Image (cartoon, coloured by chain):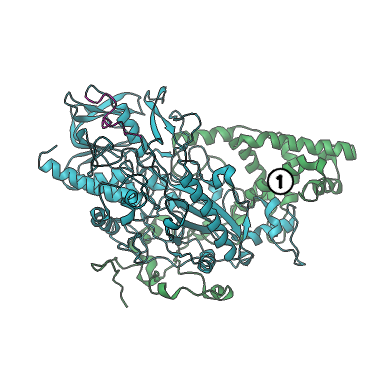
Chain colours: A cyan, B green
């Protein structure tokens, strides 16, 4: 909780708002170019190698709630994401009849501390979707523009995977992938029977060292708790903190940016922020402002940055800020596999996440929905935590009793105790994560009636899925049943039907929200140009997932990193040319 | 070996030499029978989180009588056997007390369910639950422990017992003796080199031929990664 009060006279070359993937990468590239950089972060500092910050390798009995989720850590008491869906004093609202859930992390590194490390490049088709299916819009850049940056990100940060030669799943500079776990072998078997490919996953986890500053994975399966050996990617451990050691980077923590300040000509002059420590407002000046606060938070800052030259908010002369907000689709299914009951025990933790996955493998021309999805697999003998031993009132029947008959559900006593042990590690499942169609009518805006506890107007979300996403979720569930049953599993739960949009997750729930400050060549229909520079303010840039024109059936982080690097190179070159 | 030394080894890649680490020193290795509740969750807590845990830990929800009932019930659900302790011995009632405050939604079903046991005892045996003899207590449990066999009029008791079974089991198996009983052996630095051979055989699996040379080999974990221009990782041997 340190807060240094900087004199308002002090000026930086660049102010970066946010320290997640985009902000962290920008802090590294810009400071290495010799620029002075201030990073403004709404949460506190965080370093998982410090024992006071460490949640990795803790056992459930080190938590009075045995690792169950809380309002502040909904993914579990040891999860390295401080914030959640509902932050005290920082509300957001939803327009009537629409839904959106917004996950925020208030800490150095943002959501990169707990994310799934699934590090997929967008493919050539992912930048040109409108040309392929007529829906949405093409990006103003293509795969070839980003490829050199993806290559550099692979080498700088590290990602394991296998070279496959698929057109739209470009290969990179991969570290060796880990061998599959037992439940993953069953999934591979089930998928093979129905001709669905399963390949080694691509995660930013170091199976071999890439430099002398970071350790290698020691297979605790807890990447979501942030790694004390820095063996997985998070922005604080791999980008921001190293940049602070090397270059002129000042970090301002616990600082909520209220707006981008401007001069009479409309140029950005810096930011105004509220210190959470003394609840006072401070101003910092800079030649360039870079927003990396997350797609929705950056849009919020821009919409709140109103001035004579930017009456609708900075960067918003097109009225597009907040528009085309879109998240990945999501649906999940679970089963229980008799062959995995009463398993022999061994350490099956592995890396933090799946060892295998299925990239999108079908042709949408033959389907009744427009875009694809990938499949993530889960299961295994992971560390028991809050929830272990639950549901024996519905699950015990899958265990055979001593006479080979299904055990009665429920019960108590030594028999129950034994059956909880027998069933341990026999459930498995999968999650589909897919591409939605960006819509002008799905957006976030400023709610005129509500402010947060810092007095900053909050976002109101307007979001509805279309038939494309709903039909995709239906297809996911058909696929899940095929794979699970062919793997030999008994399906658990019921297949969701149209009344629940086929189990399609609420918008925002997959935490891949993008598109709110999209790039484009036409200043009338986009916020940023192809260099992520605001059309109407040439010293304002966005480096989070806001610039995405479409989200692809991939996870956004690797593209945020590549784009932020590219944007940072452009900023350096424009400053050198004295264009900004 | 302490944690700092572990870390040093992780950084220097000494794990690659096949030197396996243990997570704790032998004197730390005694089983934690009653998990430490005081002080709240360890590691990386914000001030807000510390205050929440302190507040919850300072409050009391269960009455002494409710606790006594729970002590009987949790040991019926998870009793001791030759090799493992009973639920009360590993602090399951304290865990339930904490969860009542952490998830307030549990409070009314728990309080009401424990009262229901008394009503059932009164109606059938003329005594409240704690005053019943063991066989009478078990008769009540039998009436609510088996969801598919239970009489419709005991539906509420079944729901209560399902909740209590969940909390008791989870409270038990998230302790060190619970881990030992389940046979969980992870959460310790190690090198994953695939499913052990004999288990692969038992399940009839072989690794896909195309990936056999692609997968990570333990012995190369110490080497700094290098690639050729086509992105092929350069591997020795």
Q: Which residues are magenta?
A: A309-322
- SS for tag 1? helix
Quadrant of the image containing the C terminus of chain A: top left
Name the residue furthest left. Answer: A577
Q: Which residue is mark 1?
A: B162
Give above or below for A214 relative to B136: below
Q: Position of residue A198 (x, y in %)?
A: 46, 64
Identify which residue, B179 or A479, lies in the foreground. A479
Q: Position of residue A468 (x, y in %)?
A: 46, 47
Q: Is residue B177 visible to us here?
A: no
Q: Position of residue B60 (x, y in %)?
A: 64, 33
Name the residue furthest bottom. Answer: B237
The answer to whether residue A311 is magenta is: yes
Q: Quadrant of residue A308?
A: top left
Q: Is residue B147 visible to us here?
A: yes
Quadrant of the image containing the N terminus of chain A: top left
Q: Is residue A138 shown left or right of residue B85?
A: left
Q: Is residue A434 shown left or right of residue A396?
A: left
Give the residue at x 63% y 51%: A494
Q: Is residue A434 shown left or right of residue A397?
A: left
Identify which residue, A54 or B200, lies in the foreground. B200
Q: Position of residue A526 (x, y in %)?
A: 28, 38
Q: Is residue B100 shown left or right of residue B135?
A: left
> What is the chief secondary structure element of the magenta stretch?
loop
What is the chain letter for disc 1? B
């Amino acid at each position: 909780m340190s807060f240094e009060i900087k004199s308002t006279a002090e000026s930086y070359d660049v102010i970066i708002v946010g320290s997640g993937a985009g902000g962290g990468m920008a802090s590294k590239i810009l400071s290495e170019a010799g620029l002075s950089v201030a990073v403004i972060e709404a949460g506190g500092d965080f370093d998982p190698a410090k024992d006071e910050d460490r949640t990795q390798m803790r056992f459930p009995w080190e938590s009075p709630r045995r690792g169950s989720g809380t309002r502040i850590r909904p993914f579990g008491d040891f999860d390295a994401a401080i914030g959640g869906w509902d932050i005290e004093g920082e509300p957001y609202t939803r327009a009537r009849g629409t839904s959106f859930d917004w996950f925020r992390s208030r800490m150095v590194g943002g959501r990169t501390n707990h994310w799934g490390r699934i590090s997929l490049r967008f493919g050539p088709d992912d930048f040109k979707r409108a040309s392929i299916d007529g829906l949405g819009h093409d990006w103003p850049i293509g795969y070839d523009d980003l490829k050199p940056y993806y290559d550099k990100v692979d080498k700088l940060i590290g990602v394991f995977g296998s070279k496959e030669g698929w057109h739209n799943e470009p290969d990179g500079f991969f570290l060796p992938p880990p061998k599959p776990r037992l439940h993953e072998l069953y999934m591979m078997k089930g998928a093979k029977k129905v001709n669905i490919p399963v390949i080694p996953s691509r995660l930013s986890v170091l199976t071999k060292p890439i430099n002398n500053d970071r350790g290698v994975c020691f297979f605790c399966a807890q990447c979501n708790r942030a790694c004390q050996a820095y063996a997985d990617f998070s922005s604080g451990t791999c980008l921001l903190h190293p940049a602070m050691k090397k270059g002129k980077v000042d970090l301002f923590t616990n600082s909520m940016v209220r707006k981008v300040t401007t001069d009479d000509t409309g140029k950005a002059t810096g930011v105004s922020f509220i210190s959470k420590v003394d609840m006072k407002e401070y101003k910092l000046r800079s030649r360039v402002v870079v927003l990396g606060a997350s797609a929705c938070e950056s849009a919020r800052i821009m919409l709140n940055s109103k001035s004579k030259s930017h009456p609708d908010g900075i960067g918003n002369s097109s009225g597009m800020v907040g528009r085309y907000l879109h998240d990945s689709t999501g649906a999940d299914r679970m089963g229980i596999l008799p062959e995995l009951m009463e398993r022999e025990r061994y350490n099956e933790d592995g890396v933090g996440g799946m060892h295998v996955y299925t990239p999108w493998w079908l042709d949408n021309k033959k389907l009744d929905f427009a875009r694809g999805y990938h499949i993530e697999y889960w299961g295994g003998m992971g560390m028991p935590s809050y929830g272990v031993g639950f549901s024996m009132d519905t699950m015990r029947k899958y265990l055979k009793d001593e006479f080979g008959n299904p055990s009665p559900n429920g019960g108590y006593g030594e028999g129950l105790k034994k059956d909880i042990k027998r069933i341990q590690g026999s459930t498995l499942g999968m999650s589909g994560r897919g591409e939605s169609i960006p819509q002008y009518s799905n957006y976030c805006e400023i709610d005129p009636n509500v402010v947060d506890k810092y007095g900053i107007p909050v976002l109101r979300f307007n979001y509805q899925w279309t038939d494309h996403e709903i039909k995709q979720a239906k297809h996911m569930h058909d696929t899940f049943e095929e794979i699970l049953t062919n793997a030999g599993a008994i399906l658990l739960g019921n297949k969701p039907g149209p009344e629940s949009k086929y189990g399609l997750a609420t918008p925002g729930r997959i935490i891949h929200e993008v598109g709110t400050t999209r790039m484009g060549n036409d200043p009338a229909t986009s916020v940023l140009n192809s260099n992520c520079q605001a059309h109407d303010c040439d010293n304002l840039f966005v480096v989070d997932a806001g610039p995405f024109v479409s989200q692809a059936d991939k996870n956004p982080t690797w593209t945020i990193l590549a784009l932020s690097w590219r944007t940072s190179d452009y900023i350096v070159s424009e400053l050198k040319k004295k264009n900004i | 070996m302490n944690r700092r030394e572990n870390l040093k080894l992780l950084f220097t890649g000494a794990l690659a030499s096949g030197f396996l680490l243990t997570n704790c020193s032998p004197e730390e290795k005694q089983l934690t029978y009653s998990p430490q509740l005081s002080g709240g969750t360890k590691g990386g807590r914000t001030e807000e989180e510390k205050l929440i845990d302190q507040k919850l830990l300072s409050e009391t929800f269960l009455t002494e009588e409710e606790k006594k009932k729970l002590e009987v019930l949790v040991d019926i659900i998870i009793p001791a056997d030759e090799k493992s302790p009973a639920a009360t011995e590993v602090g399951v009632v304290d865990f339930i007390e904490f969860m009542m405050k952490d998830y307030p939604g549990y409070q009314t079903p728990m309080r009401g369910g424990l009262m229901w046991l008394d009503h059932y005892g009164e109606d059938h045996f003329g005594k409240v639950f704690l005053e019943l003899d063991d066989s009478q207590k078990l008769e009540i449990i039998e009436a609510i422990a088996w969801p598919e066999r239970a009489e419709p009029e005991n539906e509420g008791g079944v729901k209560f017992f399902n909740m209590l079974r969940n909390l008791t089991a989870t409270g038990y198996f998230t302790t060190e003796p619970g881990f030992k009983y389940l046979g969980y052996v992870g959460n310790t630095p190690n090198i994953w080199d695939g499913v052990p051979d004999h288990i692969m055989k038992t399940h009839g699996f072989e690794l896909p031929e195309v990936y056999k040379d692609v997968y990570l080999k333990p012995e190369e974990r110490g080497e700094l990664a290098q690639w050729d221009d086509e992105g092929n990782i350069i591997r020795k041997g």
